[in-house]
Image (cartoon, rainbow, N blue to C red):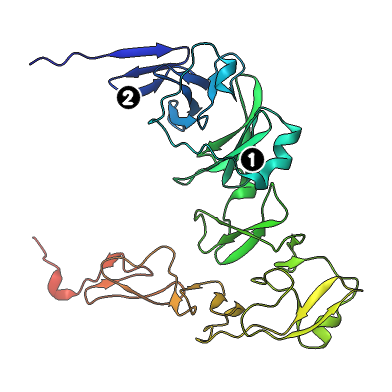
Amino acid sequence: AATIATSVASPGIVVKDEIPQCTTEGRFADPHDCGQFYDCLPDDNKGFVVQRQTCFGNAFHPDLKLCVPKEKLKNCFPDSKSGRRFEVADSSHQKLCRKETNQFLCADCKTLLTCVDGKPFTYECNDGTVCTQNTLNNVTTGICHNKKPKECTCEKAVTFKRDFYDPSKFLSCQDKSADPIILSCPEGLLFNEKRKACGIIPTSDKCSEEGGSCLILGTVGQHCPGDIKLIKQSAEDQCICCLPATCEQACDNGGQCLSPGVCLCSEGWSGPSCQQPICDPACLNGGECVAPNTCKCLAGYQGNNCEHCELNAFDITVII
């Protein structure tokens, strides 16, 4: 039997046999479902990256390019089975949506916030994308983009950096160019980029004088985690002074114990106890990474990354 191709279009997007194709850059309504839309973003090959997004049970307004209550769009009945839908709003982002009643915002480097009549709905940027404020259809809006903003990228291995949008959060980077993991400081505290820790910058450093640190990473609420001993809470310094954390399995190769069972590894090392060396580029042809950027090659191979065959006199044939 012959297969009949079906094609449905809306301005900027053509959906043929359920495969979307962008004709120009922008944000466009899904011709099949008024509760969905497509973001058409330029790629590196003069084409477009297509992202299908949802209004979480609400309606996408094709003129405003925003999600609005479905009652505000005539004859709109969103498909209850389509897309990734969460009809329960996330109250933790309520304050952001009070300022922008209907808008797309970046709550943090990995969270796209959809505000509908002041109610927040969250969508996690996945597949290596991060949230960025970009211009689509001549309007600045939040999108999940594969061209990452520098502030949301892992530029170094085994480090932490403050989130670009929310100073109470920070990025955990295990490897260079890896997809960052977003972590949160205890409520009411900010991430200190210099100290690589959560807290309020103290007026003095009495904690370190007693062998402790000011609210180290991993603390929760007003208490030290696990078996970390609370020295004192200093009203003057506005921080909790805790003794250094201890890890049951020691952090090797210069690694630092952040909280019980959590190691921050030195550059060139990874793994739960910082026992695994990192070779970048990786060892080739079955070579083993035995130390940072040091490969042990199998017989017959040589080079920094075991990339070359090892020649000897018996391997050379001379033709006269």
Relative to 31, 226 lies left or right: right
Mark drawn on residue 70: none
Q: How many marks?
A: 2
Relative to 297, 199 lies left or right: right
Q: Hey, which quadrant is residue 70 in on the image?
A: top right
The image position of residue 68, as x and y in percent, is 60, 23
Mark 1 sits on what residue? 106
**Residue 25 visible in the current orientation:** no
Do the residues under discs 2 and 1 have CB atoms within 8 angstroms? no
Mark 2 sits on what residue? 19
The image position of residue 119, as x and y in percent, is 65, 35
Image vertical order of residue 48 relative to residue 12, above or below: below
Is 255 or 167 nearer to us in this picture? 167
Residue type at numbered disc 1? Cys
Which residue sits at x=50%, y=62%? Answer: 175
Viewport quadrant of the C terminus: bottom left
User: Quick one: SS at disc 1?
Assistant: strand
Which residue sits at x=71%, y=56%? Answer: 168
**How much space separates mark 2 and mark 1, taking CA atoms?**
28 Å
Which residue sits at x=60%, y=80%? Answer: 257
